[in-house]
Image (cartoon, rainbow, N blue to C red):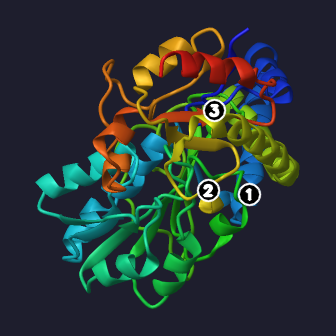
Amino acid sequence: MTIYLDCNATTPMEPKVREAVWKYMTEEWGNAGSRTHEFGARAKQAVQKARDQVAEVVACSREEVIFTSGATESNNLAILGLKAYGEQQTKRHIVSTQIEHKAVLEPLAVLEKSGFEVTLVPPTTGGWVEPTDILNAVRDDTLLVSVMHVNNETGVIQPITEIAEQLAAHPAYFHVDAAQGFGKEIPTLRHPRLDLISVSSHKIYGPKGVGALIMRRREYQKPPLTPLMYGGGQERGLRPGTLPVPLIVGFGLAAKLALKHAEERAETCLDFKQTALGFLASLKPVIHGELTRSLPHVINFSIPGLDSEAAMLALKGIVAISNGAACTSSSSYRASHVLKAMELSDDDIQGALRFSWCHMTEPVDWVTVVERLNQIL
């Protein structure tokens, strides 16, 4: 049996979540926008319950949760949605980092074509950005600061709290792509200075195709976003379209379970990590990203003299792993922009492997993994 070790790409669904999604697909199929009968009323109640469950994870109100199709859409809405306001206020400068997901970097590139200026702060060789470097890049005309919560390739946690505190006296909006950290590293996302937070259900053992944009009010004023789509007025006019009630219900329950079991899940994943590192030690792996700053469910590494494609082929049928981000449409491998920004050598970048797991991951036959890799060295 092949053991799935690509949970940073997507996680398996919790059994309780799967049951809830199925119920709302087969028994409670009402439209949450239907106001004239009990089917619609029950669907609306289920959506509101899920909204509360998501809100509790980041300590915000239900009115501040906008359901989307996932973090990619949320990132686009947060970044491109500020365009009109930035032009109106003549604030056309944005600060972000070189290690962001493409779902942030590409919308930023769109704004650059419209006359905005984007400053991308480089990371340290350990994989995180220094808060002072972010602050030093901020100017009087800075509209937005966008820094990810946890890097999707290395698992390195970014100093979001420190950045938020340093931005306290600046009016720029602070956006955090929290796809990898939501429901796993809890306290950070509860900081009141985080104006916009993007999250995905399928990273926390919920269904694919649903996520949220958290829009925290600042002195009772919500961030001045302009919608990217129109038609229907759902989600406070920011995200039109019929709400996918089964997916939202699943997302809400997954958020509730993530909050409830965060500590025990982290302990299980840390045990797994220590076991993996212990077995891999004989291969003398080069770890990419500071382990002490990383979440417990992922390691990114290379083995001197070993190409990642050869390694994945050798481990086929034993473990399912990745050599980088899975969230692109390209069928061919492209060298990681994250590892390049960390100034890794070309050999380390070409050999990089990402192992990521969860609390439901089955035990791995590490002896065979090491044997297979030794055979191709």
Q: Secondary structure at mark 2?
A: helix
Earlier in the chain: of badge 3 and badge 1, it is 3
Instruction: Give the side of residue 125 with respect to residue 114, left or right.
Output: right
The Cα–Cα distance between marks 2 and 3, rounded to whole angstroms, is 18 Å
Please indicate, yes or no, whether residue 45 appears anywhere in the rendered image.
Answer: no
Q: Where residue 4 sits in the image (x, y, percent)?
A: 67, 22
- State the residue in front, 349 or 131: 349
Quadrant for residue 122, please give it. Answer: bottom left
Q: Where residue 115 sits in the image (x, y, percent)?
A: 11, 62
Mark 2 highlights which residue? 291
Question: Are the residues flagged by discs 3 and 1 in contact, CB closer than 8 Å?
Answer: no
Quadrant for residue 11, please give it. Answer: top right
Write the residue at 43% across / 17% down. Answer: 310
Instruction: Give the side of residue 46 with respect to residue 203, left or right.
Output: right
Instruction: Give the side of residue 191 with respect to residue 110, left or right.
Output: right
On screen, residue 8 above or below 91: above
Q: Where residue 63 sits in the image (x, y, percent)?
A: 64, 59
Mark 1 highlights which residue? 57
Decide: few, some or many residues near mark 1? Use Cα within 10 Å; few <14, some 14-19, many ≥20: many
Mark 3 highlights which residue? 7
User: As shown in the figure, which amino acid type bears the numbered disc 3?
Assistant: Cys
Quadrant for residue 102, please give it. Answer: top left
Write the residue at 54% across / 15% down. Answer: 375
Decide: few, some or many residues near mark 2? Use Cα within 10 Å; few <14, some 14-19, many ≥20: some
Please indicate, yes or no, whether residue 341 appears anywhere in the rendered image.
Answer: yes
Q: Secondary structure at mark 3?
A: loop
User: As shown in the figure, which amino acid type bears the numbered disc 1?
Assistant: Val
On screen, residue 106 above or below 84: above
